[in-house]
Image: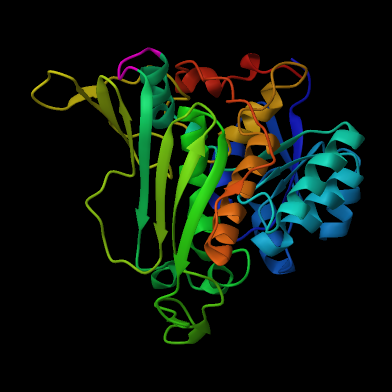
Amino acid sequence: MGDPHRVGVVGLGVISRAYLDTLANHPAVCIAAVADLDASRSAAVAAMLPGAEALSVERLLARPDVQTVLNLTIPAAHADISLGAIDAGKNVYVEKPLAVTLPDGRSILERAASAGVRVGCAPDTVLGTGTQTARAAIDGGLIGRPMSASAVMVTPGHERWHPNPDFYYAPGGGPLLDMGPYYLSALIHLLGPVRAVVGAASRLRDERVIGSGPRVGQRIPAEVDTHVTGVLEHVNGALSTITTSFDGIATTAAPIEVHGETGTLAVPDPNRFDGAVRLFALGASEWRVLEPRAGYAESSRGIGLIDLVRADGQRPPRAGGDVALHVLETMTALLRSAAEGRRIELTTVVERPAPVPLTPVEDWKAYDAYEH
């Protein structure tokens, strides 16, 4: 069968558990090494992963048998760690966003192309049955020609539950760069790339209060805008509106709705892999739930890295760096538009990723499904 693909994980914070739950027991992947600024955390995680070694970041990046680095650091460190991995001749799969700035994102893809290595990037939630079933419905003509979409994410802020939420309110954070990648990646899968944007943004307050953990009650500065809204002009002519907010309390809006000439789709939360896709067709009297018809069934964080491994010598990764760079430019252009008060045309170009056929969990977890 050949050897499993060897992965080194850098950054062992809150999100790492979801990735490790998927990857640790997958026969196509071997977690060879882990690293974190907290050496005790690295040692504890390595002890739970047979064959994994706790290393410093420098030693992990230099380790010759690590083929792909899974970069789960905070956004401000994404570029440095990814570029270090690429310079060491390794593929990289990075937690969203690809980088904090567009120049850093471009550098990651340009250096990877020069080095002949691949880049993948979260979110991979859009590869699950929720977004992929909605895409199959659109591509199958169930709503006719798609004309518009709306995407809405409203919460009071992550400081309510995260014990160390500082980075959510530092440059590279905020609701758009944190949560926008889920919604924008979904819109690109559903409707294709974006041509231009118009944005507006605001900040309700300059401080946030940590609501859980050992720092409960501590005040932290909010250095970024915490409510961002905008209009996206897609290359195919469709218009999308997006709202991402850490300043609201709740919303009754569907996470994503897509409107076509003959129907409307309600798309489930793109921060989840599954969920009900609902169709209201022209002439119908009520919403109809569509059975899953595409996507990795019962998937979880890490499926994008597995998809990247499977893409060896084949199609491009579906959660690829090219999509992540386009998402990053869309977000930074929205913020720039808000600051400058004008429409901004994008410079990046990307193809819609290949659709995911309906893939049962036993199939995507099988070793034989993956080429090495």
Which corner quadrant of the image does residue 117 belong to? top right
Residue 218 within the magenta-colored segment of the rendering: no
Residue occupying the point 33% across, 44% down: 255
How far across and how far down the image is residue 268, in percent?
33, 37
Question: Is 96 or 215 nearer to us in this picture?
Answer: 96
Left or right: residue 221 compared with residue 67 = left
Residue occupying the point 56% across, 33% down: 193
Please identify the residue farthest to the bottom as the structure is shown: 218
How far across and how far down the image is residue 264, in percent?
26, 28
Residue occupying the point 49% across, 15% down: 357
Compared with residue 367, is residue 220 higher up or lower down, i.e. above or below?
Answer: below
Q: How many marks?
A: 0
Residue 272 visible to an observer of this rendering: no
Please identify the residue farthest to the front as the structure is shown: 342
The residue range painted magenta reads: 140-144
**Magenta span: chief secondary structure:** loop
How far across and how far down the image is residue 174, in percent?
52, 65
Which corner quadrant of the image does residue 340 belong to? bottom right
Compared with residue 47, is residue 90 higher up or lower down, i.e. above or below?
Answer: above
